[in-house]
Image: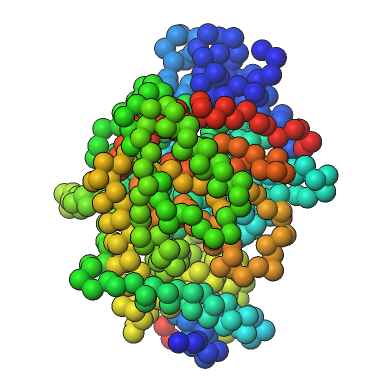
Amino acid sequence: MSDLLSLDLAAARDALAKREVSSTELADAYLQAMEASEHLNCYVTTTADKAREMAGAADARLATGDALPLDGIPLGIKDLFCTQGVPTTAGSHILDGFRPEYESTVTSNLWRDGAVMLGKLNMDEFAMGSANVTSYYGPVESPWKRQDGGNSRLVPGGSSGGSASAVAARLAVAATGTDTGGSIRQPAAFTGITGIKPTYGRCSRWGIVAFASSLDQAGPMTKDVRDAAIMLTSMCGHDPKDSTSADLAVPDFEAALTGDIKGKTIGIPKEYRMEGTPAEIEKLWSDGADMLRDAGAKVVDISLPHTKYALPAYYVIAPAEASSNLARYDGVRFGHRASLEAGDGITEMYEKTRAEGFGHEVQRRVMVGTYVLSAGFYDAYYNRARRVRALIKRDFDQVFADGVDAILTPATPSAAFGLGEMTDADPIQMYLNDVFTVTVNLAGLPGISVPTGLDSQGLPLGLQLIGRPWEEGDLLNIAYRLEQSVGFVAKPSKWW
Amino acid sequence: MSLDKATVTHIAHLARIEVEDAQLETMVGELNNILSWIEQLNEVDTDGVAPLASVTGHAQPLRADAVGDGAYPDRVLANAPDRAMDFYSVPKVVE
């Protein structure tokens, strides 16, 4: 095989099954590429020995002709998933030295199906960020460059920035991500790859470092829609260890990819036409709607009236849940503990440990969360935000009840920006990156980002499709049709 | 409403995060910006709307109140920053 790294998941699976390539060869090719690309800073930990061991076991199974669904496929794992015996940092100093004694359910499912772990991927600290600049382990760089010759270093988006950059730079066949407000879909759009956040409850949250438990979902980040369907099928499933995990059968999502979307109704929400959206994104969006119409879908205008309030509601609910979830980082049971001075008691231990261990963005969100949950403000902020959340969900419920099968929107309000270009911006400017994605988390719906074009600088742009709850198969099929119509083939030219 | 330094110091203490005086001013400004941006939620008519607790509407599952796994103190304590026998060690709490 000439270029192992260019194989997508489906092609690698077929080549492995036909024994045209071994899993060990594939893993070695990736490990070499990873070593040569360390300056992109995608991986926090490389697990070369484990990769070779898992690849060897996969090769033994493949030799018997009795292959598992993902047998021998090398994956990168976002460093938010606990992996037994392998450091798990969540991009934070406070988890220094933490080696979980257990494996997350989602990664267990992937290993059960034969996948091979290449390493742990960099991310925004505790998944809080949209540019992968809040990681204690430094920023991740995108493999894409603007065509202006300026050679600016671009962000891959966040929080699953290491995952996005690794898949785009061919440093993993595919990767896991997690999405609390857009953390799979926004970086996928920035790097020209595909990312799906399934319905809340599809993937078990057990063993994933918690950020905002009512919003967090895992999902795959892949080269295309078919790969997303294959990997998502393995990741999903009921888990008694997560009480919000849905006890529903998981269909074979790949089998749903017929490309036939005749008679489907696609909604175009007028509230997503926002002031300041670049003309090229507006055009991408209307072109996407035309393509779906040409494929036999009915395209209708819809209204989701509470869209405007999604981001502020999110920035009450997510910090509130984070302040509670992150209370466990106290320097007692795992991770970093500050060195203490004579006379320091347990309160000083907590306060110094958390001041040293948490970065600025995490501290700010924990403090916002603490405030909105504190006595006297709980109703005014937290309960009000949860009421608005109910209205946002009701907007979607009504549209789906009116017969809409999926909703088409832009994935992001801009293409990727430069590292450092947002340094002096107000935190709220950074939060606006998730303006099109955050509603989906609040309503618990499945959403997928598909690369559909390039901007005038040659940077990828994506469209988002939002589906009905539990209808990931239908959603993936519509995304598959869009992908076929668009024919997006752009790849970053190799400089890294 | 606007937070002052004393309030932010109090929130920091509730959150068990030491904030140095030099950072306090910045923190006050940032928190006030975020909170005033959040105030737009007050424009929404939420009368008669219950706070959303679960997006799926699935019933909370119950399990038998039985012992699952356990009895492996070495695994539980494997990541402890400071361990004394089969206990986590912390600064003295009670005089």
Seen at 69% across and 69% down, the residue is A424
Seen at 68% across and 62% down, the residue is A422
User: At which x and y percent is residue B20?
Assistant: 63, 82
* Residue A121 appearing in the image: no
User: At which x and y percent is residue A151?
Assistant: 81, 47
Q: Is residue A313 above or below residue A110?
A: below
Seen at 56% across and 36% down, the residue is A452
Q: Is residue A409 above or below residue A237?
A: below
Viewer-nearest residue: A82 or A455? A455
Labels in figure, total? 0
The quadrant where residue A96 appears:
bottom right
The N terminus of chain B sits in image quarter: bottom left
Q: Is residue A117 above or below residue A95?
A: above
Viewer-nearest residue: A339 or A127? A127
Seen at 47% across and 43% down, the residue is A464
Q: How is the image coloured?
A: rainbow
User: At which x and y percent is residue A53?
Assistant: 56, 26
User: Does A353 sit left or right of B66 as displayed?
Assistant: right
Q: Is residue B87 above or below residue A52?
A: below
User: At which x and y percent is residue B79?
Assistant: 51, 55
Viewer-nearest residue: B88 or A437? A437
The C terminus of chain B sits in image quarter: bottom left
Q: Residue furthest right?
A: A149
* Residue A303 appearing in the image: yes
